[in-house]
Image: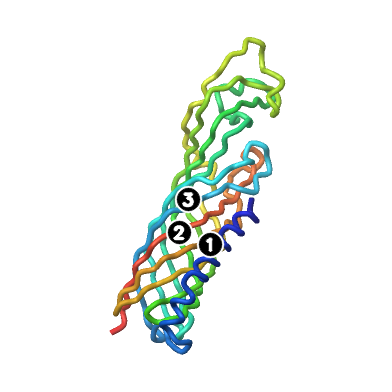
Amino acid sequence: MKNKTIKILSLAIAALFVCNSNHIFAQETATTTVCKPHDMTIGVHGGSNLSLLYAGNYEINKNYNFGVGYNLGLNSSYAINNFLSVVAEVNFAKMNSERKDMQPLMVNSPLQTTPYPLFANYKKVEKFDYIEVPVMLRATTGKKIKLYGNVGPYIGFATSATMETSGRSMLYKDLGGQIQEGSNNTIYSLDGNQNITKTIKTITFGLTGGAGLGYTYDKHTIMLDVRYDIGLTNIRENTALNGKNNLQTIMAGLGYSYSLRK
């Protein structure tokens, strides 16, 4: 899944470069500069994201799929020279990842009444709210029409997390659903909602990278940005009970920045 995600992002970035490179370089020469050294910008941005819980080491936290969320943030940049700049952001990101298949009941489920794990076919969605602070090095070419790439680390602060479950299923003693728990063919409701903030680590770290296009008019720049975040740290507390998971996110959005140069 990880390699597939990276391939999807690579194709998206490649398409961005190919579709716009002829237009960019037809209008700009190789010697044009993006901004003056020591130029500073401030701005806002937002967009949608696809998030995935991966690297699960227990059956209870494997086989997640991408969930759709969104992000909003503030950004600022400082030009080191005519080509390189440092970009810092403060972002609010709403992320979620889901699983829908035969899976273990949660350990705190009221239906988990046996000393051995029980299984059911239901849907589980985990939702996370994060404040993320990436600091990236950005390389840019072009003047009026810009093409850029950026990469750097980020730190994330979890503010809340919830888990929603839904569906109706019989209970089983095995993951394959062959051995029924009991013999009365009872179908149980798996609907539920619980706060899992205390089971999530407050701070996480990762790497972010991507590319984008910008159009500049005077001191104003409109940007189209595509980015990939990969979490390097496990987000779960009490891994003996909850297992391990990392988060990865694909983001696409629009941004606006304003130059503070005089």
Q: Amino acid at mark 2?
A: Ala
Please, what secondary structure does the residue beneath circle 1 have? helix
Please report the residue visible at 60 percent of the width from the left and 27 percent of the height from the top.
121
Percent position (x, y) of residue 84? 48, 80
Query: Which of the two discs, 1 and 2, labels the residue nearer the N terminus?
Result: 1
Q: Amino acid at mark 3?
A: Ala
11 and 105: which is toward the camera: 11
Q: Is residue 6 above or below residue 34?
A: above
Please report the residue visible at 50 percent of the width from the left and 39 percent of the height from the top.
196
88 and 125: which is toward the camera: 125
Please, what secondary structure does the residue beneath circle 3 have? strand
Task: Please give the residue where the numbered disc 3 appears in the rendered image.
Answer: 158
Q: Is residue 227 above or below residue 54?
A: below
Tell whether 26 sits left or right of 174: left
**Dot 2 crowding, Cα within 10 Å, few <14, some 14–19, many 20+:** some
Task: Please give the residue where the numbered disc 2 appears in the rendered image.
Answer: 252
Percent position (x, y) of residue 220? 31, 74
Q: Which mark is residue 12?
A: 1
Q: Quadrant of residue 63?
A: top right
**Dot 3 crowding, Cα within 10 Å, few <14, some 14–19, many 20+:** some
> How many marks can you see?
3
Q: What whole-number distance in Å separates the C-alpha atoms at marks 3 and 2?
A: 21 Å
Q: Nearer the viewer, mark 3 or mark 1?
A: 1
Q: What whole-number distance in Å separates the C-alpha atoms at marks 3 and 1?
A: 29 Å
Q: Amino acid at mark 1?
A: Ala
Labels 3 & 1 near each other (Cβ < 8 A): no
Labels 1 & 2 near each other (Cβ < 8 A): yes
Q: Nearer the viewer, mark 3 or mark 2?
A: 2
Q: Is residue 49 above or below residue 59?
A: below
Percent position (x, y) of residue 125? 51, 38
